[in-house]
Amino acid sequence: MKPSDAGQGAGYWYPPATEGATHHAATGIDVLNALRAYRTVESGLRRALSQRLSINDTDLGALRHLLGVWQKDEGASPKELALALGISSASTTLVIDRLEKAGFIRRRRHPVDRRAVILEPGDRATDEFRSAFDIEKRGVLAAADGLTAEETETVTRFLRSMEQAIADAVRQPDHTLGS
């Protein structure tokens, strides 16, 4: 999917800021539509990676999380993975089973607590998975590195405030449903 294709349906949530105007100053609506278009393209990339690796979206999210943990030279437990994905321990076991069978991870007994399990990279995780994510990482990093210091600060502040707005909305009960 090309970035211009993603913008086609971006106004379904937020109305176009200025219908028919040829040149206008960007508005908050334009920013939200651009963010939505980015998310659409990024979702397409996730789907393509899932297909390339022959795994589902939950498994892909698990691998993303585990790769981040492993890059910090930390061990990952099934419980930590369940918390990161927001899924039950039973669902986490199924994810781990699928990823282990596919060669992306290995289970290893904890060196101190023999009852505990540590998840570590499997044969496919180090090569195939990392090369698949390098495509995304290179392009996104180049885009971020192209920002000035002031732009970086502005974008970071905006994204953090969006993150907080969504977190606040999730914590608040929805009074519009069932009322």
Image (cartoon, rainbow, N blue to C red):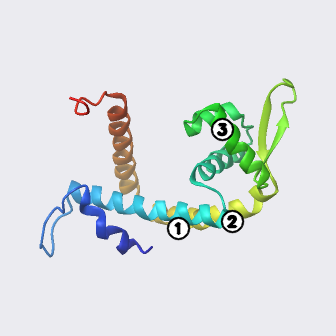
Q: Residue at x 63, y 50 (%)?
A: 59
- Horizontal placement of 160 versus 33: left or right? right
Q: Are marks 2 and 1 in contact (CB under 8 Å)?
A: no
Q: Gap in Å between the C-alphas at discs 3 and 1?
A: 31 Å
Amino acid at circle 3: Thr
Element on which disc 1 rests: helix
Q: Residue at x 62, y 45 (%)?
A: 65
When asked about the image quadrant of residue 33, the answer is: bottom left
Where is residue 122 drawn, in percent x and y? Answer: 80, 52
Q: Is residue 147 visible?
A: no
Residue placed under numbered mark 1 in the picture: 139
- Horizontal placement of 81 versus 119: left or right? left
Q: Gap in Å between the C-alphas at discs 2 and 1?
A: 13 Å
Q: Nearer the viewer, mark 2 or mark 1?
A: 2
When asked about the image quadrant of residue 86, the answer is: top right
Sooner in the amino-acid sequence: mark 2 or mark 1: 2
- Horizontal placement of 39 versus 84: left or right? left
Seen from the viewer's position, the closer of residues 102 and 129 is: 102
Please say if 112 is above or below 169: above
The N terminus appears in which quarter of the rendering?
Answer: bottom left
Q: Dot 2, how many residues are within 10 Å of its Cα: few (below 14), some (14-19), or many (20+)?
A: few
Residue placed under numbered mark 3 in the picture: 92
Please say if 21 is above or below 104: below
Where is residue 150 drawn, in percent x and y? Answer: 36, 54
Q: Gap in Å between the C-alphas at discs 2 and 3?
A: 25 Å
